[in-house]
Image (tube, rainbow, N blue to C red):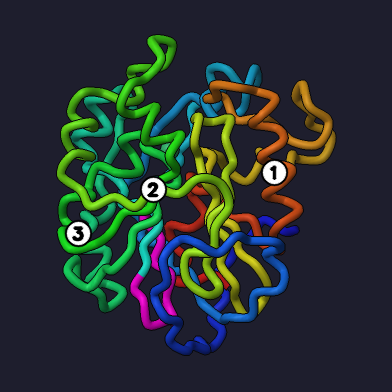
Amino acid sequence: MAVYGYAAALGIVGCAPPLISCVARVSSAKWLAMSYVVRPIPITRVKIDKSVMTYLMNQGIVIEIATYAWAIDGGGTRILVDTGCPAEVQTASGFPATQVHTLREGLVKIGWRPGDVDLVILTHLHLDHVAYAEELGRATFVVQERELATATNPHPAYEGFYPPVLRELLGRLRIERVNGDREIVKGVSVMLTPGHSPGGQTVLVETGRGVVALTGICCIKENFEPPRGVRGISRRFILPGIHIDIEELYESMERIAEASDIVVPIHDPSYLEVEQIP
Ligand SMILES: [Zn+2]
């Protein structure tokens, strides 16, 4: 496992996988043999106290993180992972943000239009990952059942992450529920990775350099690769600051590291300038 952070422009090798329904159980991500690339679409920059990303550490240090949509390119099915969020919506929800691209602008930059997107895999249903969903009107949205149940009836402990406006939005989308680990199309799978949220899912993408994991956990690179000599309460990882179950969170991080060759922490700012992974 390596956390990927540098632009690497390798050739795109693509063939068209059929769109299949979410029925095949994933036994191992390693056997997949497709060759996609992942294109980061930066949506917002966000100033945040570092302790939000690193549990019980770095209080009072302001860092910049980013939100993204991620295009999975190289197949016949146009797949997006998450949609990002308008900066004003993110700012209103307590995370001061500035817009890098609207979703539409970001899609145009990679040669897609909103109407081209067939499938959107939502890592989870916090607003920063789903707020642009209605711009992708013809797409089907793949969501874990546990996450959908939570968004519909959130526990009071974290109901602020699932406001009424989100429930109304979800009611207008075409949603395909999944329960656990599934292959979505050949070479693209989801893995249930709860802990940050009850039904977070990590997306595993087969590429020419191995399996890329788009984490279903809001995190940055330091979470998976702590700087030398820096340890939080866990030896292996620095746990992200936002979680609803810290043991599940740790176990999900272990699963992500083991199932992939390249971990892409979905809020790391280093992808702002990256055109494709790998
Ligand atoms: Zn997030």
Residue appearing at x 42%, y 71% in the figure: 20
Q: Which residue is mark 2?
A: 177
Judged by depth in the image, the label closer to the viewer, 3 or 1, is 3
Task: Tell me the crowding category of disc 2: few under 14, some 14 to 19, or many 20 or more residues within 10 angstroms, Cα based.
Answer: some
Q: Position of residue 110 (x, y in %)?
A: 31, 74
Marks 2, 1: nearer the viewer: 2
The residue that mark 3 highlights is: 136
* Vertical arrangement, residue 130 with respect to residue 2, above or below: above
Q: CA distance from mark 3 to mark 1?
A: 32 Å
How far from the left and from the top, in percent, is residue 12? 50, 86
Label 2 and label 1: CA atoms lie apart by 28 Å
- Kindly identify the amino acid type of the residue bearing the numbered disc 2: Arg
* Residue depicted at x 62% and y 46%: 221
Q: Which residues are magenta?
A: 68-78
Q: Position of residue 25 (x, y in %)?
A: 60, 60
Sooner in the amino-acid sequence: mark 2 or mark 3: 3
Residue 85 sits in which quadrant? top left
Does residue 214 appear in the picture of this structure? no
